[in-house]
C-alpha cells in the first residue's frame, strides 16, 4: 500500500514555509506502529508533522487540552456551537483538495451554517502503518493552510497508528467550536411556505471529482472539488438577510438530501426548477455518461439557504458579490403542497418527486 | 451537449404535447379504456419519470413499462452464482455499477464485497480486461449482462482477450435478447398492449427488421425511439398517428443513431462469440426459449461458467410478488400488495424494484404524481 | 437498458488497439471504435465524427442529416401549433372592425 499511495499533489498556491527554524528531524520515511506507541518516536512524529505545521507562534508547552478565555468567546455571540466530523475519503489527494483541506473546511462549514463564527478545531488522525511520513506531512500542511486562511486555529489533536489493514491509509476527525451570532436563529425546521431556496454556486463538483479521482472509470476531466470554507460568505449572507431561516452545506447526498431533510423537518413542500439548477457542463457530461443525477452528488463548498421572500434579492446579491458565490442562484421555493416532499419542475413543466437516496448512487450503465 | 440539448427543448415539447392532445381527442371517441403503450426499454422508463412526461400527457395514454431492464429481469439464482464466483479467493469480480445492488437469495454483490469478496465496479468491459492484464496472478471475471446493445461490447472484449492471449480473463455471460421475449409477451392471450415504443439502442445494433413480425403478425404499431424527452414524445405521437390511420408499421424516429440495417460490425462480433441458449430464465417472467446467449465452444476458455463451479440453483421469486403482471401491463405497480411496504428500493422483493429503471422503483423513487403517490 | 450518450471523437488514442478519444462535454475517455470504423481506412478519418457511446464502445455514427430531418419535422409541428394557437386566439377575441 505504501507504494500505491497517490503522490501528493502540489498545492495550487505555494505554502508559506511553516515557521519552525529549528525544525525537528524525523528519520523515518514511513509511519510505523512505534509512532503510535506514546514514546519518543510518537513525540518526534507529532513535532515534525503536526506542531511544525499548525503552530504559528512558536511551540507552546505540549498540554493535553486547549484552553479558551470564556470572556473573549462570549464577546462574539451568545451561544456556543460544537460539531464533529470524520473524514475517510479515498483517494486522500484529489483535484481541488485533499483529506486535510476537506476536514478543516467541512468542520468550519458545519459551524458556519449554524450561524456561528468558527473559533477553533481539534484534529485527531488515525494512521495505517506504512503510510509515508511525507503523505501525512502534506495533509498536515493542507490543514494548516486551510485553517490559517480561514482564521481558525487547530488547537489540539491526537495521533494513533493502527496495524496495516485496520484502517485505510488515513482517517481524520475534526471537532470544532464556534460562537453563534446574537439574534441569529437558523434551523432545519424553520422554513415556511413562500420562502425562497438559494444555493451559492455550481452543484456536484466534489462528488464528480472524487468519483473520477478513484480512477476506476478511466474518464479524463478537469472537474475539481469545490472544497472551501464558507464562513466568510455566510457572514455576508446573514448580514444581507438577517431573517434567514436555514443554512446547510450540501455534502453527502447532495442538494436533494438537504432539501428532503428540510421538507420533512419543516413540514413544508419544496418546489425546485430544473432549469434554475447551476451545474457546469463537465459535471452534466460526467453524469450523462454514468447515468448519475447531479442533485445527489456531494459538494464541499456549497450551501443551501432558505430566506423569507423579501430577503431573497439582497441574499442573492450578497452571495454573488462573494468569490465563493458568483454562480449563486435561486433554485426554488417553499410551498404548502405535499408537505415533506421535494418536487422538481422539469424543463417541460412536467413534475417529479426528488426523493431521498437509498444508498450510494451507483453508475447506471446498462 | 450536441444531439442532446436540441432534443430537450421545452418549446418543441409543448408543441408535441399539444399535437398528442389533438390526436388523442380524436382517438378517444368511442373508447372505453385507455390506450396502453409499452415502452420496452428501461432507459425509456427512466426518461419518462426523470422528465415527468406522464403528467404532461392526456389520460387516454397509459405507459406500460416493459421488460427491458436487464438488471431487473436477472433471476436471483444468477446473482447467487455471481456471489459464488466472487467469493473464490483469487477472483477479482468486475461489474457495472447498477448490478451491485441486485439481491439474490444469498444477498447482493455489494454485500459480498462487504464480507471480503474482491468486487469492483467498472465502466466498461475493456476496463475489466485491463485489470486482468495488470493482475496476471488473479482471475478477473466480468459480469456480462444486458441486451443486444451491450452484447457487442463484451463480444469484442472477449475477442481482444483471445487475440492478446489474456488467459486470466473470463466472462460470466447473462446476456439476453429482446425479440423472443416480445414474442412471448405478444402470444399471451390477455396481452392488452395497443402499441410499442421500441428500444433505440438495441435497434442501433440489430436494426429495425427484427420487429416486423409485431406489425405483420400481431398488427401492433412500433416506433423505434431515442432517449431524450422530445424523442419519446415524438415517437408516442407517431404511434398514435398510426393508430388513428389504422396502420400497424415499424417506424424509426431515432434515425440519427439507428440505421435500418443495424450495425454489421457489432452483429459480426456477436455472431462470432455467442450462440443462443435453449432457454433462459427471466425474473418475473419465467423461462423463455431462445432468449439468452452463451459463449461458443471456441471461446470456452473465456467462459466463467465453464471455468468456475457455479451452483446454478434456480430460486423462485417470492410468491406475493406481482412483477409478472406489472411487466405484462395487466397490473399497475401500486396494485401490488408489497409495493412500498414489503418491497422498497432498499429491500427489493421483486425484479421491478431492483434498478431505478424498473417500473416499481421508478414509481417509488420519482413518484408517479399522477399515480399512487399523488 | 443501455445508457448511451453522444460524444465527439477528438483523437486517435491507439490505432493498433482501435481506440479513439471521445469528448462528452469536456469529459474524455478512450473508446473502442471497431463498430464505427471503415475497414481499411485510417482511424484519423474519424476525428470530428459524433458517435453514440455505450460502456466504452462507439456503437453508432450519429447521422447529422437524419438529426436535422427529425428536428425539421418537429419544428414544423411547432409552427403548425403556433398557427393553430393564433387562429384560436383570433376566434376567441375577434378583432373589432
Image (spheres, coloured by chain):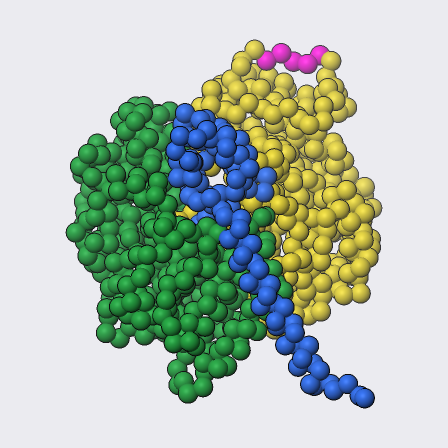
Chain colours: A yellow, B green, C blue
From the top left corner, tell me how far across and down residue B358 is, in percent.
39, 60
User: Which residue is at the front of the view, B308 or C25?
Assistant: C25
**Which residue is depicted at the point 63% across and 68% down?**
C79
| Residue located at (28% from left, 70% from top) | B218
Residue A152, placed above or below residue B340 = above
Q: Measuring from the top left, give residue B86's x and y in whole percent.
A: 29, 38
Residue B99 in sight in this render = no
Q: Nearer the viewer, residue B136 or A346?
A: A346
The answer to whether residue C89 is visible is yes
Q: Which residues are magenta?
A: A22-26
Q: Splitting the image into 4 quarters, where does residue A186 fall? A: bottom right
Q: Main secondary structure of the magenta part?
A: loop
Q: Quadrant of residue A260?
A: bottom right
Compare residues C30 and A313 and report the one nearer the observer. C30
Q: Is residue C49 magenta?
A: no
Residue shown at 65% from the left, 13% from the top: A24
Percent across and percent down for residue A193 are: 68, 70
The image position of residue B59, as x and y in percent, is: 48, 78
Q: Is residue A240 above or below residue B329?
A: above
Q: Residue at x 52, y 37 (%)?
A: C9
- Image side of residue B351 versus residue B12, left or right: left
Q: Is residue B20 left or right of residue B319?
A: right
Q: Is residue A23 magenta?
A: yes
- In the drawing, does residue B351 fall left or right of residue C68? left
Q: Quadrant of the N terminus of chain A?
A: top left
Quadrant of residue B284 in the image?
A: bottom left
| Camera-nearest residue between A197 and A42 | A197
Amino acid at each position: 500500500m505504501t507504494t500505491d499511495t497517490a503522490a501528493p499533489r502540489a498545492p495550487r498556491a505555494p505554502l508559506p514555509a511553516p515557521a519552525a527554524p529549528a525544525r525537528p528531524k524525523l528519520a523515518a520515511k514511513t509511519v510505523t506502529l512505534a509512532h503510535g506507541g506514546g514514546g519518543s518516536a510518537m513525540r518526534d512524529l507529532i513535532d515534525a508533522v503536526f506542531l511544525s505545521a499548525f503552530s504559528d507562534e512558536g511551540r507552546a508547552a505540549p498540554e493535553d487540552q486547549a484552553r479558551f478565555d470564556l470572556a473573549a468567546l462570549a464577546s462574539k455571540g451568545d451561544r456556543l456551537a460544537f460539531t464533529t466530523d470524520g473524514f475517510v475519503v479515498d483517494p486522500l489527494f484529489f483535484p481541488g483538495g485533499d483529506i486535510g483541506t476537506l476536514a478543516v473546511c467541512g468542520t468550519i462549514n458545519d459551524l458556519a451554517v449554524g450561524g456561528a463564527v468558527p473559533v477553533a478545531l481539534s484534529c485527531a488522525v488515525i494512521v495505517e502503518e506504512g503510510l509515508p511520513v511525507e503523505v501525512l506531512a502534506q495533509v498536515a500542511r493542507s490543514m494548516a493552510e486551510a485553517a490559517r486562511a480561514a482564521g481558525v486555529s487547530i488547537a489540539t489533536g491526537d495521533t494513533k497508528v493502527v496495524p496495516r489493514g485496520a484502517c485505510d491509509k488515513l482517517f481524520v476527525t475534526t471537532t470544532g467550536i464556534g460562537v453563534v451570532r446574537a439574534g441569529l436563529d437558523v434551523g432545519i425546521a424553520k422554513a415556511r411556505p413562500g420562502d425562497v431556496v438559494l444555493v451559492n454556486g455550481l452543484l456536484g463538483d466534489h462528488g464528480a471529482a472524487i468519483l473520477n479521482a478513484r480512477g476506476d472509470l478511466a474518464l479524463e476531466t478537469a472537474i475539481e472539488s469545490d472544497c472551501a470554507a464558507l464562513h466568510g460568505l455566510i457572514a455576508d449572507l446573514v448580514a444581507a438577510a438577517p431573517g434567514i431561516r436555514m443554512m446547510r452545506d450540501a455534502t453527502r447526498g447532495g442538494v436533494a438530501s438537504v432539501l428532503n431533510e428540510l421538507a420533512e423537518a419543516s413540514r413544508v413542500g419544496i418546489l425546485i426548477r430544473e432549469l434554475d439548477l447551476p451545474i457546469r457542463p463537465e459535471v452534466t457530461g460526467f453524469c450523462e455518461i454514468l447515468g448519475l443525477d447531479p442533485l445527489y452528488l456531494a459538494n464541499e463548498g456549497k450551501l443551501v439557504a432558505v430566506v423569507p421572500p423579501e430577503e431573497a434579492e439582497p441574499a442573492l446579491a450578497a452571495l454573488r458579490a462573494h468569490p465563493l458565490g458568483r454562480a449563486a442562484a435561486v433554485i426554488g421555493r417553499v410551498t404548502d403542497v405535499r408537505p415533506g416532499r421535494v418536487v422538481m419542475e422539469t424543463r417541460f413543466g412536467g413534475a417529479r418527486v426528488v426523493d431521498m437516496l437509498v444508498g450510494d448512487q451507483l453508475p447506471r450503465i446498462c | 451537449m450536441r444531439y442532446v440539448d436540441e432534443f430537450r427543448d421545452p418549446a418543441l415539447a409543448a408543441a408535441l404535447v399539444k399535437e398528442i392532445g389533438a390526436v388523442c381527442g380524436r382517438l378517444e371517441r368511442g373508447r372505453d379504456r385507455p390506450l396502453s403503450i409499452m415502452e420496452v426499454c428501461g432507459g425509456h422508463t427512466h426518461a419518462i419519470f426523470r422528465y415527468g412526461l406522464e403528467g404532461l400527457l392526456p389520460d387516454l395514454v397509459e405507459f406500460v413499462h416493459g421488460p427491458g431492464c436487464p438488471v431487473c429481469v436477472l433471476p436471483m439464482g444468477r446473482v447467487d452464482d455471481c456471489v459464488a464466483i466472487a467469493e473464490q479467493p483469487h477472483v477479482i469480480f468486475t461489474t457495472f455499477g447498477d448490478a451491485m445492488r441486485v439481491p439474490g437469495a444469498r444477498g447482493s454483490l455489494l454485500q459480498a464485497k462487504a464480507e471480503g469478496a474482491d468486487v469492483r465496479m467498472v465502466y466498461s468491459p475493456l476496463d475489466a480486461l485491463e485489470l486482468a492484464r495488470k493482475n496476471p496472478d488473479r482471475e478477473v471475471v466480468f459480469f456480462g449482462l444486458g441486451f443486444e446493445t451491450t452484447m457487442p461490447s463484451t463480444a469484442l472484449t472477449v475477442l481482444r482477450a483471445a487475440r492478446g492471449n489474456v488467459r486470466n480473463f473470463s466472462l460470466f455471460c447473462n446476456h439476453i435478447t429482446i425479440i423472443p421475449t416480445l414474442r412471448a409477451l405478444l402470444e399471451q392471450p390477455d396481452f392488452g398492449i395497443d402499441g410499442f415504443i421500441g428500444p433505440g439502442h438495441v435497434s442501433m445494433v440489430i436494426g429495425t427488421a427484427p420487429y416486423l413480425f409485431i406489425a405483420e403478425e400481431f398488427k401492433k404499431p412500433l416506433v423505434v425511439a431515442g432517449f431524450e424527452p422530445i424523442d419519446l414524445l415524438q415517437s408516442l405521437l407517431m404511434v398514435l398517428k398510426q393508430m388513428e390511420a389504422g396502420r400497424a408499421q415499424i417506424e424509426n424516429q431515432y434515425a440519427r443513431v439507428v440505421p435500418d440495417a443495424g450495425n454489421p460490425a457489432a452483429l459480426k462480433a456477436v455472431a462470432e462469440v455467442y450462440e443462443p441458449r435453449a432457454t433462459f430464465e427471466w425474473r418475473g417472467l419465467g423461462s423463455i426459449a431462445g432468449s439468452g446467449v452463451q459463449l461458443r465452444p471456441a471461446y470456452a476458455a473465456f467462459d466463467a461458467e465453464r471455468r468456475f463451479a457455479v451452483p446454478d440453483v434456480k430460486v423462485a421469486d417470492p410468491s406475493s410478488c406481482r412483477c409478472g403482471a406489472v411487466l405484462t401491463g395487466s397490473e399497475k405497480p401500486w396494485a401490488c400488495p408489497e409495493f412500498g411496504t414489503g418491497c422498497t428500493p432498499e429491500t427489493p422483493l421483486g425484479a421491478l424494484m431492483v434498478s431505478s429503471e424498473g417500473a416499481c422503483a421508478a414509481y417509488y423513487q420519482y413518484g408517479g404524481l399522477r399515480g399512487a403517490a399523488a | 437498458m443501455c445508457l448511451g450518450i453522444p460524444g465527439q471523437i477528438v483523437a486517435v488514442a491507439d490505432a493498433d488497439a482501435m481506440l479513439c478519444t471521445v469528448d462528452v462535454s469536456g469529459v474524455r475517455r478512450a473508446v473502442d471504435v471497431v463498430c464505427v470504423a471503415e475497414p481499411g481506412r485510417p482511424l484519423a478519418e474519424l476525428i470530428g465524427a459524433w458517435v453514440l457511446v455505450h460502456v466504452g464502445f462507439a456503437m453508432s455514427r450519429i447521422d447529422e442529416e437524419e438529426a436535422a430531418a427529425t428536428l425539421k419535422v418537429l419544428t414544423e409541428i411547432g409552427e403548425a401549433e403556433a398557427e393553430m394557437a393564433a387562429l384560436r386566439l383570433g376566434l376567441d377575441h375577434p378583432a373589432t372592425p
